[in-house]
Image: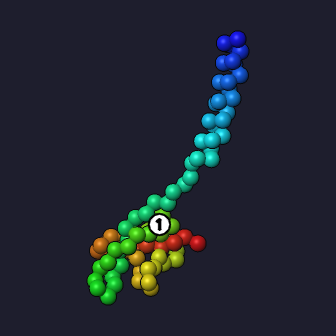
Amino acid sequence: MKTKMIKIVLPAFAIMMAVGLAFATEDLPVYKTAYYLGPNGITTTSVGDDCVRDGAINCTYDGFQLYEDPGLSNALGKNP
């Protein structure tokens, strides 16, 4: 009786865990700090992981070009 119960319950429990954990994962965006030269000097903002160093389309915030570092030397862009 005991082994029959283990043979049925254990695989069923493993399948339920696998299905439940498959839906429990999600890809969260990674936010990083970006810098821009605004009217009040160098200012920071947060951007998602779609703004990268060598992107083809400029990443902007309120019309200002975003940069990776406070020295404003590495411009950020988006890939099409």
Q: What residue type is labelled 1?
A: Gly
Tell me the quarter of the image containing the N terminus: top right
Q: Taking 36 as reference, is 20 left or right?
A: right
Q: Where is residue 13 in the image (x, y as percent from the top left)?
A: 65, 30
Relative to 60, does residue 23 appear above or below in the rendering?
above
- Please state, as top left, top right, bottom left or bottom right, where the C terminus lies in the image: bottom right
Q: Where is residue 14 in the image (x, y as percent from the top left)?
A: 64, 30
Q: Residue at x 69, y 29 (%)?
A: 12
Vertical side of 79 occupied by 39: above or below: below
Q: How crowded is mark 1: few (under 14 residues within 10 Å), some or many (20 or more)?
A: few
Quadrant in the picture for residue 64: bottom left
Q: Which residue is drawn at 63% across and 41% down?
A: 20
Residue 73 visible to an observer of this rendering: no
- Count of numbered circles on the image: 1
- Using the image as rendered, state which of residue 32 and residue 51 is in the foreground: 32
Residue in view at x 29 percent, y 79 percent: 42
Pick whichever, 30 or 80, lies toward us: 30
Examine the rendered structure and indicate whether residue 14 appears above or below residue 53.
Answer: above
As helix, strand or loop, the secondary structure at mark 1 comes to loop
Residue 27 can be seen, yes or no: yes
Q: Classify residue 18 by image quadrant.
A: top right
- From the viewer's side, name the closer residue of 39 and 18: 18
Question: Which residue is situated farthest in the front direction here?
Answer: 1
Which residue lies at the image location 71% right of the left edge and 22% below the top edge? Answer: 8
Which residue is denoted by mark 1 in the rendering?
48
Is residue 17 or residue 54 the one in the foreground?
Answer: 17
